[in-house]
Amino acid sequence: MVQSLLFLRPMRKAGYIGIFIFLTVMGVISCVDDNIQPEEAEPYISVKFINNRSLDTLNVLLAAIKADIAVITKRITAIDAMTDKTPFLAEKDSLNKVKASLTTEQTEVNNKINKLKKGYVKLTTLQSLGGSSPITKLDSTGTNEFPLNSNATKSRFFTTIRLSDDNLESRLDTIEFEYTLDTLFVENTIRISAQWPKVTYYSFDSVSNISCKDSITCTSNDASLTIYY
């Protein structure tokens, strides 16, 4: 009988240790669950603007400048080929000055074209449907992040774009996105993800297809599109 009791003591002790470990683990899990916090950042989609109308105007101007330079270059070459070009040196100097001026203008126009192609536009305001105030985080020199409403599966935005630096005229347009919502748990944080965004309405001239880095999930934060106006 005594031997049986002595045998049960370590068994009881092992049982107590097991219960203690179980309760400790459960307590840790409970603490982790209590520390899960919702992430306030809304999902977004990256939007780039291309001013096609200004591009068309600049491309026409660029073609005209190139044509003028070609005519002047041809004349200068002809003068250089003359046996006695002394009577035409003044004309050549004048043509070189005009060519230099046109070359400078060509560089400026090319710079403007490159900026427009990169999305350098004057996006002055961005307002979401139902929003109390315009969205202030705007990048007027590149890609803008449009925050999608994580409490709905649709988001509509109103944009005000200044047409040019030397023109105070601006235009108001709208675009609407539709998407599905998913809840992710990342490092004890609840993150709302918008997936498979698509454009359901726009008033711009045209919009590109939405490009996704991951074609399987197509999360909005990794998606982008280009708007043409």
Image (cartoon, helix red, strand yellow):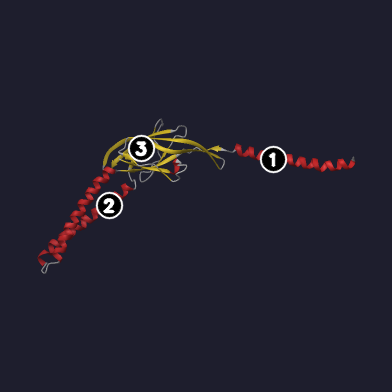
Q: Nearer the viewer, residue 33 or 131?
A: 33
Image x and y of residue 37, in percent: 55, 37
Image x and y of residue 137, in percent: 41, 40
Q: CA distance from mark 1 to mark 3?
A: 54 Å
> Is 55 on the left-hand or right-hand side of 96?
right
Where is the N terminus found, in terms of image quarters?
A: top right
Image x and y of residue 129, in percent: 39, 31
User: Which residue is most to the front?
Assistant: 216
3 or 2: mark nearer the eye: 2
Residue drawn 71% across the image and 41% down it: 21
Q: Is residue 187 above or below residue 102?
A: above
Label 3 Cα neighbours within 10 Å, binned few <14 / some 14-19 / many ≥20: some
Q: Amino acid at mark 2?
A: Asn
Q: Label 1 belongs to which residue?
A: 24
Q: Amino acid at mark 1?
A: Thr
Q: Label 3 belongs to which residue?
A: 125
Residue drawn 65% across the image and 40% down it: 28
The mark found on residue 141 in the picture is: none
Q: Secondary structure at mark 2?
A: helix
Q: Is residue 47 above or below residue 65?
A: above
Mark 1 vs mark 3: which is more N-terminal? 1
Q: CA distance from mark 3 to mark 2?
A: 27 Å
